[in-house]
Image: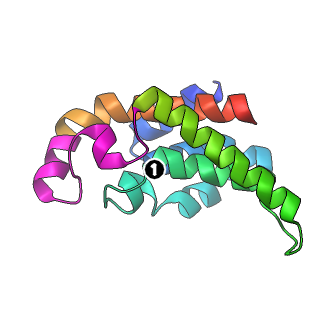
Amino acid sequence: MNKVEYAVSCFKEGFSCAQAVLSAFGEEFGLNRECALRVAGAFGGGMAQMGKTCGAVTGAFMVIGLKYGKTKAEDEETKKKAYSLVREFVERFQSRNGSIVCKELIGCDISTPEGLKRAKEEKFTIVCPRLVQDAVEIIEQIL
């Protein structure tokens, strides 16, 4: 199973978009599945179901951080590389989807009971798996 298939399958199992994206890459960077799922656990649904930045996007940011995050305070070059890749990711994701904001991407506000109900009935099965797929494809291209 490739990373895209893994991530989409993980999402369909019931994990969040952020968890699906991060866990598809975690082991490659020394982060086991359980740890990846825990780390990304609060980022789904646009940051804890607030409808803000899409979890597939924040999951991708975490993957970029695993590969290019600085580990020495003075390492400004590594920081610039990570920030540059985040900007490139955002540009590509927005180009495909028009936004990086969860409620704009899925067309409803999941921070409300009505919006969450609608998302569960319609959006989580169609729109979100495609966003997870897009995030993983873009990460694979830019890393």
Is residue 8 at all visible to an observer of this figure?
no
The answer to whether 53 appears left or right of 66 in the picture is left
Crowd band around label 1 with a 10 angstrom C-alpha radius: few (<14), some (14–19), many (20+): many
Q: Quadrant of residue 127?
A: top left
Q: Is residue 99 magenta?
A: yes
Residue name at image x 40 percent, y 40 percent? 99
| Outermost residue to the bottom | 73
| Outermost residue to the left | 114
Q: Is residue 112 magenta?
A: yes
Residue name at image x 30 percent, y 43 percent? 104
Q: Which amino acid type corresponds to the residue marked 1 in the rendered image?
A: Gly
Q: Quadrant of residue 12?
A: top left
The answer to whether 92 appears left or right of 67 in the picture is left
- Which residues lie in the magenta part? 98-119
Decide which of 87, 8 is in the foreground and name it: 87
Q: Quadrant of the N terminus?
A: top right
Residue name at image x 33 percent, y 39 percent? 105
The residue labelled by disc 1 is 55
Decide which of 88, 58 is in the foreground and name it: 88
Residue 25 location, x and y as percent?
A: 68, 42
Residue 64 location, x and y as percent?
A: 70, 49
Indicate whether 13 appears above or below 79: above
Is residue 38 at all visible to an observer of this figure?
yes
Indicate whether 14 appears above or below 135: below
Residue name at image x 15 percent, y 42 percent? 118
Residue 29 location, x and y as percent?
A: 78, 50
The answer to whether 46 appears left or right of 79 in the picture is left
Q: Quadrant of the C terminus?
A: top right
Indicate whether 97 appears above or below 120: above
